[in-house]
Image (tube, rainbow, N blue to C red):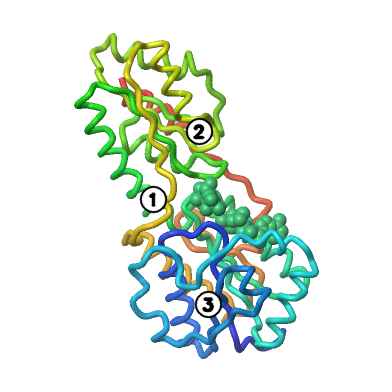
Amino acid sequence: MKEIKRIGVLTSGGDAPGMNATIRSLVRTGIYYGYEMYGIFKGYVGLINGEIERLEARDVSGILQKGGTKLKTSRCPQFLEKPYRDKARSICDVFGIDVICVIGGDGSYRGAFDISKEGLPVICLPGTIDNDINSTEYTIGFDTALNTIQDAIDKIRDTAYSHERCSVVEVMGRSAGYIALNNGIAGGADVILIPEVEFNIDTDVIKPILEGRHRGKADFTIIVAEGVKNAQEICRYIEQKTGMVSRHTVLGYVQRGGSPSAYDRVMASRMGDYAIKTIHEGRLNRIISLQNNKLVDIDIEEGLNMQKTVDKDLLKIAKVLSI
Ligand code: ADP
Ligand code: F6P
């Protein structure tokens, strides 16, 4: 195997709190093990365009606590086309970059897999608030997003209590319900709607509200994962069927920002360290994952073929706790 001397780092796809902590860990651990570290800006767009700079230890000072990504990120449809990936590989040849560390979500992993098959070694680290990467129990940014969303839900519950209203809160998660499920439990939601579970609005939304009112509940919180159903339409239907004043909140992009939690900072630091050690021990084209609460590195193709789904027992817990 060719000796590794230069390692590139990029962030790709939706940004996530903790990406900067991951960048910092990769750069400093890489320097510690004797590698030259390079920042690739704006994800795959910057890789194709050669937006690349050498990074020294001081270049990642003061970013551990910052949300977003110092390297910027992008969504890059061109990267699905081989000519653009060929350009990216030629750019790496020009800079002498031997392997790239990709911090991103499932889509970024697929781009990394494609370019690894074409000759550019990669290491993937899970960075997305969605927690929807099948090969890992945890993705960097998930804990921070849960806490950001929780603060918002608690505030919404204050006003719903005061006005005896129904609140419908739409949260992110792409096509997965990990955020909605966890924030539903943490927020004491009466109803949680996620893409993984079919629902009937009359039996799964209206009925619990009517039964709750019969038991003396005066305000209700419904968490709906994006894409499942329009929060405003749910509100209108609740008002029609129950007579309760209902208000919707789409949390939007506030869920993606903020200073990373201590958990995300530690996980980011650990995963960055593990990624560099994986390279140092001669393993390439690997995905860094948390499995059974331990860090592992998995072959990228094997990892992309893994399956996981939400813990539907959490839905049962939420239902019992909302009586
Ligand atoms: P995330 O990594 O957060 O899931 P995206 O799904 O947007 O975000 O993926 C990030 C980028 O990865 C895309 O903009 C595209 O450049 C690249 N990508 C996504 N899917 C593929 C694929 N199947 N093949 C090649 N590149 C892909
Ligand atoms: O993947 C992270 C995420 O925030 C998803 O939860 C959301 O659906 C998507 O990104 C939004 O993408 P964009 O930032 O491109 O609008």
Q: Is residue 110 visible?
A: no
> Mark 1 and mark 3: span between their CA atoms?
32 Å
Tell me which label, 1 or 2, sits earlier in the chain: 2
Residue 62 lies, in percent from the top left, at: 33, 76
Q: Which mark is residue 238?
A: none
Q: Nearer the viewer, residue 299 or 191?
A: 191
**Point 31% across, 42% down: residue:** 152
Kindly identify the residue that appears in the image at 24 percent across and 18 percent down.
218
Please give left or right for residue 78 compared with residue 22 in the image. right
Kindly report which numbered mark, 3 or 2, lies closer to the viewer in this rendering: 2
The amino acid marked with disc number 2 is Ile
Pointer 1 local density, CA inside 10 Å: few below 14, some 14–19, many at least 20: few
Question: Label 1 is placed on what type of residue?
Answer: Val
Which mark, by number, is residue 194? Answer: 2
Q: In the rendered image, which quarter contains the N terminus?
A: bottom right
Examine the image and state in which quarter residue 304 appears.
bottom right
Residue at left offset 45%, top offset 56%:
293
Residue found at the very far left of the displayed protein: 162
Q: Which residue bears the numbered disc 1? A: 254
The residue that label 3 is drawn on is 276
What SS does tag 1 mark?
helix
Q: Residues at badges 1 and 2 in contact (C-beta under 8 Å)?
A: no
SS at badge 3: helix
Return the residue found at the far right: 83
Q: Nearer the viewer, mark 1 or mark 3?
A: 1
Above or below, 319 against 79 in this view is above
Front in this rendered view, residue 19 or 29: 19
